[in-house]
Amino acid sequence: MSEVTSESASTTETAEAPVRTVPAAPPARHTGRLAGPLNALAPHAKIGMVVGGVLSIVGAYLAWSTFVLNEGAYPERATLTMFVEPFGVTGFRLHITLLGLATIVVALLRVPAKHRIVRGLGVGVTAVAVLNGLWITVEGGGLGAITASDGTVAFGSIVALVGGLVTVLSATAGGLEDKPVWEWKLAWWVEWILLLVVFVLILLLVAEVLTSGGQGGVVNPYAGVVFLSLLAALAGAFAALNASGLLTWVGEVSERHRVFSVVVLLLCALALPFTGAGTEYWMTVASNIGVYAATAIGLNIVVGLAGLLDLGYVAFLGIGAFVAANLSGAAASVIGIHVPFLLVMVISAVVAGIFGAIVGSPTLRVRGDYLAIVTLAFGEIFVRSAQNNIAGLTGGANAIPNIPQVALGSFQFNQSISLGPIQLPGGVMYYVAIVLLVAAVMLVFGNLKNSRLGRAWIAIREDEDAAAAMGIRTGPIKILAFLIGAMLAGFAGAFFAHKTAVVAYDSFRFLESVTLLAAVILGGMGTIPGAVLGASILFVLPEKLREFADYRLLLFGLALVLIMRFRPQGIIADKHRKAELAEDPEDAAKEAPGALPTEVK
Amino acid sequence: MSESVEQPELEAPPGEVTAELAEDMQIATGTREPILESAGVSMVFGGLRALNEVTFSLKEGEIIGLIGPNGAGKTTFFNCLTGLYTPTSGSVTLRGAPMPQDPARVTEAGVARTFQNIRLFPSMTATENVLVGRHVRMKQGPVSSLLHGPRFRRSEAEAHDRAEKLLAFVGLTRFADELARNLPYGDQRRLEIARALATDPSVLLLDEPTAGMNAQETEATRQLIFAIRDLGVSVVVIEHDTKFIFTLCDRVLVLVQGELLVEGSPDEVRGDPRVVEAYLGAPPDEVEAQIHAGEES
């Protein structure tokens, strides 16, 4: 992307308009590598955007593949056979059509930040075209698969790609504006309805994303690409919405109705079994995501708030799980007593917390990299001990199998439930329980963050010596971070043991710690939605991309490198972090809410 | 920050804010008794004697200036007073009780400090920085932090109220929600003072509070320090700007090569030939001897 000079992007204050800052379109004088073509294109930006949109849609309706793929959800839509059912436009074709239509509409209307919105849409089209084109090429064995071969032609992906690129280039040439800031205030009940609609949409979207492409692996070899393609389209739409400033505005509205938002979000999360994701398989996937999300939030206390790098954190999940397994009455446990589940959760958390405090105690002496190595060693000690069946508590290579289900009276949590005409799938109770657990963990994190203790953690992260000079006893406070973080993982571990019914040492290896850490960093350090989003992405992807299982770590590493390069603050940034990592403080001031008052500049 | 900053009104804190704060902090006892004392404090780093038998006494409500050439041991002395260093020999006492050897406990006991190179929490807002300063005076256990009950909310409200007053006191109300790192330099120094005052100190140690400030900002800082004294806080100031020190302090200490060279009123110190020599150097024939004697300074 070339840079756009934006010195005249001055904020024009208009008192009566609902928009606080309508960014005036900057004069399109481009500098940088693509300056020549961009400046030449600038006067025709509008036409370019429309052409790009049209090309995208045309591309979507051409054939994408010169060969007929095997049976399954993907091929019907992707090959020549699509026109057997001309109105059956689904999957990536639907996404590109929608993005293309939006491009044309926005390009023709007078919309604030038009070019930036269109660029987002164009990036979405481009990404979808590239992903599907690549996949077809690889599957069909060469470029012939997306061009012409054996008398059939299939230029769909190429035309869509060109359309996407034309859109992006024209939008950039037209000059990217600043994000507008909306200041609408509606009646409270209108805002409530709006939030309700938005949250229900989010719920449906989550269900759609979760189930898109179906279960991965041998059952459905297309799951991965269908899922990724949906993600790409969503990313484009998200970028466009964000550029329009509407996302920020909805965020502000939900901030105004905090309690309402939290309650509705919780209800929406509980309503997931009623959507397309309401099958036993997806309930299991969602529950697993929940376990890791809760653990990631715990890790976020240690890493995100207190700034202590913990590379062996998954051990606490393991300790919680093994404690629960041993107290579950499973035949393989040496203790062999059965303790009620709620009590087991507490015991698991306490034991994990004690280990957390032990692991945290070196923080009194070692800092930074050295602490990371200590925690890494602890993680290894835990895995090796568990592998060697230490004191007969972990079952070694045999694991601890057949852990009984959590039961409420005679009802076991893995049974399905009938609510009148609606049949809820098995495992739904586990899902409900994990949603409540994650909600509780979020509450713990949020409340601690906004307290004396949370501020002390952040102060230690920022400058430990200065924190000590402010009267913060850094030693105990750091150990407390480890203790609380470990307790949250312990809770999740107890749940994990009962949910999966088997606890084996190899669920808690170094790789899992790294994945959790990556989830926290990817999602956004120090934020709750960030940790949940990160955990969701990193634990859903392997589920969808089973055919790429061999390359999992490679792709994973690549994704992390890209994220660190282009969005180091994570997908959902903490407003503080964002400012910290912004290269130009003025950019940060522009982006951060409650930014620097203009008169100071 | 660009240089085209329109200078905000820099003036002494409004009287009513000072009065309210003084009532909240309840520091002044009006006794004029010695509050912070050191007796024969020495500090040795390896072979370097950074401090040699420094003895001083700060009375309540007093402003003491600590001057001396670079490397004279001023900051080392501050670090000994605040528990960052444990003196090799000698003792530090606060109201007659030995000073704890741990920065956090020193702050708890009522001695707060600022740093020579500003050490704010850069990614926290101005208000949050001051709230961290309240840490030591707030009563919130882990459990109440978790549950956010009525007691918690009251203590948060009190802390926020105090933070607001302190920001008004140092004149940073307009930056309350701004990240510390985005503040102009001089305002960062003022924020550091507000943060230190949030710990309800009876003694405030300021390490070069006017470094890098222009004349106008320096004057505002002088007014601010007088206002801090009016709160009942006793102040020790390290500074290079002798003019600033001589117009601010009740008493001035001159530290040269770890030794307390002169102590007295600004007028006495200003006229002392030894001070002139320490700052401007000895007559030429003595310079050579000096170079050999004190290269580390």
Image (cartoon, helix red, strand yellow):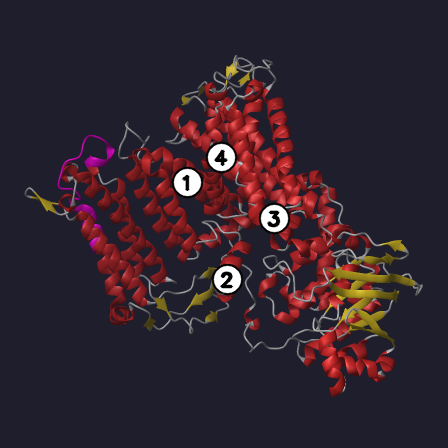
Residue at the spot 28% in from the left edge and 67% down from the top edge = A34
Q: Which residue is mark 3?
A: A367
Nearest to the eye among marks 3 and 4: give it: 3
Q: What amino acid type is highlighted by mark number 1?
A: Ile
Q: Dot 3, crowdedness within 10 Å: few (<14), some or many (≥20)?
A: some
State the CA–CA distance, disc 4 to disc 2. Answer: 31 Å
Q: Which mark is residue A537?
A: 1
As helix, strand or loop, the secondary structure at mark 4 comes to helix
Q: In the image, is B235 to the left or to the right of A220?
A: right
Nearest to the eye among marks 4 and 2: give it: 4
What is the chain letter for disc 4?
A: A
Mark 2 vs 1, N-terminal side: 1
Mark 4 vs 2, N-terminal side: 4
Q: Is residue A356 magenta?
A: no
Residue at the spot 47% in from the left edge and 32% down from the top edge = A509
Mark 3 vs 4, N-terminal side: 4
Q: What amino acid type is highlighted by mark number 3?
A: Arg
**How many dots with numbers?**
4
Residue A296, compared with residue B234, is above or below; it is: above
Discs 3 and 4 carry the same chain letter: yes
Q: Which residue is mark 2?
A: A588
Q: Dot 4, crowdedness within 10 Å: few (<14), some or many (≥20)?
A: many
What is the chain letter for disc 1?
A: A
